[in-house]
Amino acid sequence: MLVVRRAFKNYGQTMLPGSVVEPGNIKRVKTRIKDRYLVEVDEHNIDKWKEYFAEKYHVSIGEPVQREAA
């Protein structure tokens, strides 16, 4: 799951911190991850990021989506 860490514009929309986004809907997703606008959240680090977003932005993020292996 990708979560917005820093606000940015994407196709004319403002992506706000704490928003869960799909990689296909983000322009230049690899660059956004590298520049830390987006963070990858999974079941191993969800507690750390929940605390970060609650403390800094006063928002809560959802649980990571479990994907089935094909």
Image (cartoon, rainbow, N blue to C red):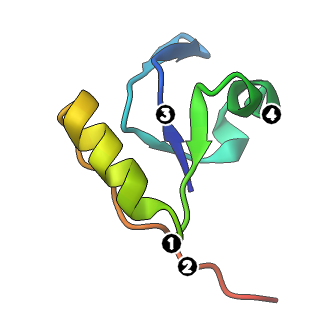
Identify the residue shown where x is 76% and y is 29%: 34
Asked whether residue 52 is in view, the answer is yes
> Crowdedness of circle 3 by 10 Å Cα count: few (<14), some, many (20+)?
many
- Residue at label 2? 66
Report if the CB atoms under discs 4 and 3 are less than 8 Å apart.
no
Q: What residue type is disc 3 on?
A: Val
Sequence-first disc among 4 and 2: 4
Sequence-first disc among 4 and 3: 3
Sequence-first disc among 3 and 2: 3
Identify the residue shown where x is 17% and y is 34%: 58
Q: CA distance from mark 4 to mark 1?
A: 21 Å
Identify the residue shown where x is 22% and y is 42%: 54
Q: CA distance from mark 1 to mark 2?
A: 9 Å
- Residue at label 1? 43
Q: What residue type is disc 1 on?
A: Glu
- Residue at label 3? 4
Q: CA distance from mark 4 to mark 3?
A: 13 Å
Left or right relative to 28: residue 14 = left
Report if the CB atoms under discs 3 and 2 are less than 8 Å apart.
no
Provide residue 35's location: percent of width, then percent of height. Answer: 70, 22
Compare residues 6 and 67 and report the one nearer the observer: 6
Image-quadrant location for residue 70:
bottom right
- Residue at label 4? 30
> Crowdedness of circle 1 by 10 Å Cα count: few (<14), some, many (20+)?
few
Report if the CB atoms under discs 4 and 1 are less than 8 Å apart.
no
> Crowdedness of circle 2 by 10 Å Cα count: few (<14), some, many (20+)?
few
Q: CA distance from mark 3 to mark 2?
A: 19 Å
Sequence-first disc among 4 and 1: 4
The secondary element bearing badge 4 is classed as helix
Placement of 8 over or under 61, stated as above or below? above
